[in-house]
Amino acid sequence: MTQEKIKNLFTSLGVTKFGFGNLEEVIPEKYADLSTGISFAIRLSDAVMDEISDDAPTHTYFHHYRTVNAFIDHVALRVVMLLQSEGYKAIAIPASQSINEPGYDYSGLFQHRTVATRAGMGWIGKNACLITPEYGPRVRLGSIITNFKGIYDEPVNTSKCGDCELCVVKCPPIALKGNLWSKDVHRNDLVDARICSQHMSTHYKHIGRGVVCGICVKSCPIGKERL
Ligand code: SF4
Ligand code: SF4
């Protein structure tokens, strides 16, 4: 069975968490036939995350970020290859790609976070990241969209951030708006992506060419517990 093969592949590759979501309500018209979303998460290194200060990321975090992204692209490609060999169409969403063109506004081809919530992986925090119950936002996400129809996980539709605002107050350029996410809340209602991006490129150019920050990830209390 294809779904079992995908699960076994994820497990054999060391993927931290995965889920299958129905994207029929959210997939753009262009990809309407690829309405199954497969989401997976790779847990970040706590030791690397804990080195991020309240003011700046680290060179190690930048390298870790890129290494995990490369691994995510590799895993997603393996899943695409598996699906194709079983006769399905599939596209791997790039691990990290922000498109600065009209209609995208610094977002990617399709939001990993949307696939993840539809696949039951967690909710979107006030830091605009996926918050998994187990590891908080200390994960990076991969996604595949496909015409394979499997058994879907229960989607997550509401936030569990409650009154917490730690990430909001820690964000140096005040890019986070402090709004509580629910299914129909747009990313722009949570974060001003332009302010975030400009802050990184202005202040962290010497660390990872100004494309990483991580302060709002590091500051989240969920997922900080060690094994
Ligand atoms: S990545 Fe940094 S600048 Fe962007 S929202 Fe998070 S804390 Fe703010
Ligand atoms: S720091 Fe608090 S408000 Fe921000 S994402 Fe984590 S739980 Fe939610």
Image: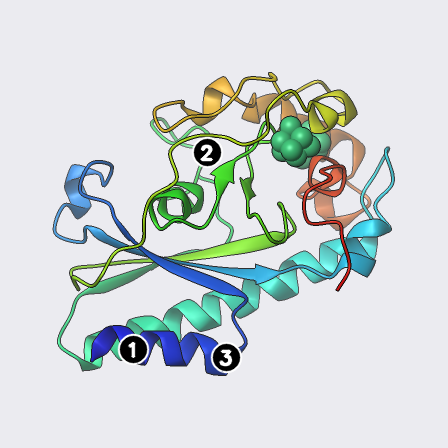
Q: Disc 1 versus disc 3: distance between alpha carbons?
A: 14 Å
Name the residue type under label 2.
Asn
Residue 107 appears left or right of 171: left
Asked if disc 1 and disc 3 are in contact, CB closer than 8 Å, the reply is no
Q: Disc 2 versus disc 1: distance between alpha carbons?
A: 37 Å
The crowding category of the residue bearing disc 2, from other C-alpha atoms within 10 Å (few below 14, some 14 to 19, many at least 20), is: few
Which residue corresponds to the image point at 47% horizontal and 78% vertical from the top-left?
A: 11
Which residue corresponds to the image point at 17% horizontal and 80% vertical from the top-left?
A: 86
What is the number of callouts on the image? 3
| Vertical comparison of 112 with 81: above or below | above
Residue 96 appears left or right of 109: right
Does any portion of residue 80 appear in the rendered image? yes
SS class of the residue under badge 3?
helix
Q: Position of residue 48 (x, y in %)?
A: 80, 57
The colour scheme is rainbow
Q: Quadrant of ligand 2?
A: top right
Q: Quadrant of the C terminus?
A: bottom right
Disc marking residue 13: 3
Q: Quadrant of the N terminus?
A: bottom left
Name the residue type under label 3.
Leu
Which one is closest to the eye, mark 2 or mark 3?
3
Q: Position of residue 67 (x, y in %)?
A: 64, 66
Marks 2 and 3, the one that precedes in the sequence: 3
Residue that carries the numbered disc 2 in the rendered image: 100
Which one is closest to the eye, mark 1 or mark 3?
1
Which residue is at the front of the view, 8 or 80?
8
SS class of the residue under badge 1?
helix
Which residue is at the front of the view, 152 or 99?
152
